[in-house]
Amino acid sequence: MDIATIVGLVGAFGLIFMAISENAAAFVDTASLLIVVAGSIAVVMARSSLGEFLGAVGVMGKAFSRKIDDPVDLITQIVELANIARKDGMIALEGQEIGNPFMAKAVSMLVDGTDGDIIKSSLNRDNDMMKVRHEMGANIFRAWGEIAPAMGMVGTLAGLVIMLGNMSDPKAIGPAMAVALLTTMYGAILANVICLPIAQKLENASVLEANNNELIIEGVLFMQEGGNPRVLGDMLASFISPKSREKIAAA
């Protein structure tokens, strides 16, 4: 579970609730919620296919879970595998416990004696398709973040039209205006507290996972060529920050 995402969402909603808690009932309007939430979902679905929309909902879990492997751990494991392969041959890698599915597939291809060019093209294709899936998910939530405020404005305009059509009762103007403005508030909250942060999280997760996959590809191809494991560690260190390289050097 990604603590930053949970803390951010709870903190944002907590602060909003604290600001409106003295008169919370005044900030609840069913019609406004339907226009903003249901309306924006309908428009997002109209802009994409059902499969893309459902796929985005599935990918959303990556914003709340932090299952991306630490690249330092990946480098350490790749160097260990390279030492085993150099000492006992590629067949000795069979049965090694590998938690990362991408690395497990790459090592399996090594053990099977697959040609280096085929390994490279297959793994690069998997990495590219992963980035496409994540980009589509992020685009759905970014589009939702753009549409929600617009739907809020639609609800506000509709409320103003209704209010102006009933100017004969001055006492009703204030409450009607408040309800009309609620849709704008709902749209801003949905976009800036939920949709856009999730889109950014998905983009960040995609970049980190793609970096890990590229690291694995480089390492596996170097192993396939029979390179020195110590040189491999130094080469893969370029994928991580200078501070993290100190951990590799100390290992």
Image (cartoon, rainbow, N blue to C red):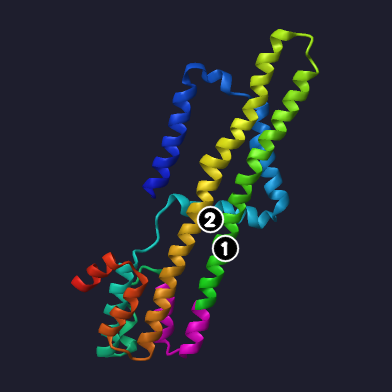
> Which residues are drawn in magenta?
102-123
| x, y percent for residue 101 | 42, 70
Residue 172 is covered by the magenta coloring? no
Q: Residue at x 39, y 82 (%)?
A: 220
Is 185 situated left or right of 151 in this image?
A: left
- Left or right side of 48 for 88: left
Q: Are marks 2 and 1 in contact (CB under 8 Å)?
A: yes
Tell me where residue 155 appears, x and y as whole percent. Answer: 70, 31
Q: Main secondary structure of the magenta part?
A: helix
Q: Is residue 189 visible?
A: yes
The disc label shown at residue 59, or none: 2
Q: Is residue 162 above or below residue 189?
A: above
Quadrant where the C terminus sits is bottom left
Residue 75 place in picture, x, y as percent: 31, 73
The location of residue 61, given as percent across then percent down, is: 49, 52
Label 2 Cα neighbours within 10 Å, binned few <14 / some 14-19 / many ≥20: some
